[in-house]
Image (tube, rainbow, N blue to C red):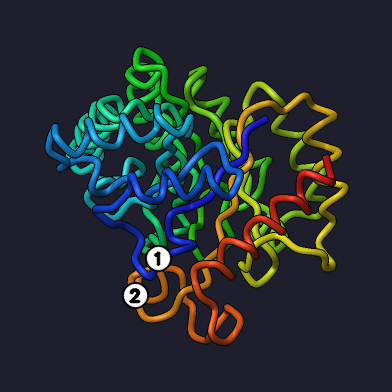
Amino acid sequence: MKFGICYCYWNKNWEGNDYPVYIERARRCGFDALEIVYGRTMEMGQAEVDEIRAACAANDVELFATGGFGPDMDVSALDEDQRKAAVDKCLVLLKALGRLDIHNFSGINYGRWCGFDDPIRKDEMFEQSAKSLKVIGHAAQELGISWNMEVVNRFESCMLNTAEEAMRLVEMTDSPAVNVLLDIFHGMIEEDDLAGAVRRVGKERLGHYHMGSNNRRPPRPGFLPWQDVCSALKEIGYDRCVSFEPLVRTGGTVALGGGNVWREMLPSGADDEMLDHILKESLSFIKGMF
């Protein structure tokens, strides 16, 4: 099993132009993968792509991508022209991910992030999304990319709030490249049984797993059933990646662009050394559960 860390743990903004620095830093902290938001992947010049790939190779770190789609990439759009245009953009995104040797893309990539315009037509949105994901899944499979649909809480999507709903869409799509991302933070809000959600998705369809504490700090001892979840992951033979997604920085796009971080979540005076120490302790804690 691999362990990953999101770029935004160290940074106030979702994206940056210094990924090689954090690829190396992820390895120094004991991680096997760095997770970045997908946006800039679609506009990077070849020199930057080459630099990132070289840093990954030098540090034995895999690059993952994540993110939530806006209206222009809403593959569940009820308007057929809008839906087809969104699919076309997703195919462009897949090629951009391929350039960076990214084989794992997760997020609200089956509809619109915080799209609540017409939630009463949820069944129709499922049909539109499945239609889109059949095309996207075929292209993703050819590139060796797992397109992981993130199960999120009711305040971020009206579509996939539970593992059961995610599996319904997976089955409608019927593509081996379209899989599921479970996130313990979202699951804590929506699922009756976090370990049961892992078992419901199973090894073949669980493409990725996100971990963070109840207030989105790095995983640490508390009331979340860490042992139950880790034991369930072991039970199904999960062997992909567990990524930490701490959202702890105020004042940047992480806080203001979806992360909703309105108070200081880090110890007073936390410097780079302390940030890395917190992360290493968190990784040791979770590895101990396995």
Where does label 1 land, which residue?
A: 11
Q: Residues within 10 Å of mark 1 (few under 14, many from 20)?
A: some
Tag 1 near tag 2, CB within 8 Å:
yes
Q: Would residue 96 be found to the left or right of residue 171 on screen?
A: left
Is residue 7 rendered to the left or right of residue 233?
left
Question: Given this view, does label 1 or label 2 mark the residue nearer the observer?
Answer: 1
For label 2, count other residues whose C-alpha is less than 10 Å away and answer few (under 14), some (14-19) or many (20+): some
| 275 relative to 113, above or below | below
Viewer can see residue 260:
yes
Q: Split into 4 quadrants, where in the image is the N terminus?
A: top right
| 215 vs 13, nearest the viewer | 13
Instruction: Name the residue rendered at 31%, 30% in the picture.
Output: 54
Residue depicted at 54% across the width and 47% down the height: 28
**Residue at 22% across, 30% down:** 50
Q: Which residue is mark 2?
A: 252
Q: Amino acid at mark 2?
A: Gly
**Is 61 on the left or on the right of 219, as rendered?**
left
Residue 173 locus on image (x, y percent): 48, 25
**Label 2: element kind:** loop
Picture coordinates of residue 122 (x, y %)? 48, 50
Residue 150 percent coordinates (x, y): 53, 45
Q: Looking at the picture, how far across and down is residue 176, in whole percent? A: 52, 17
**Element type where label 1 sits in the image:** loop
Q: Residue flagged by tag 1: what amino acid is it?
A: Asn
Q: Earlier in the sequence, mark 1 or mark 2?
A: 1
In the displayed structure, 251 sits above or below 170; it is below
C-alpha gap between disc 1 and disc 2: 8 Å
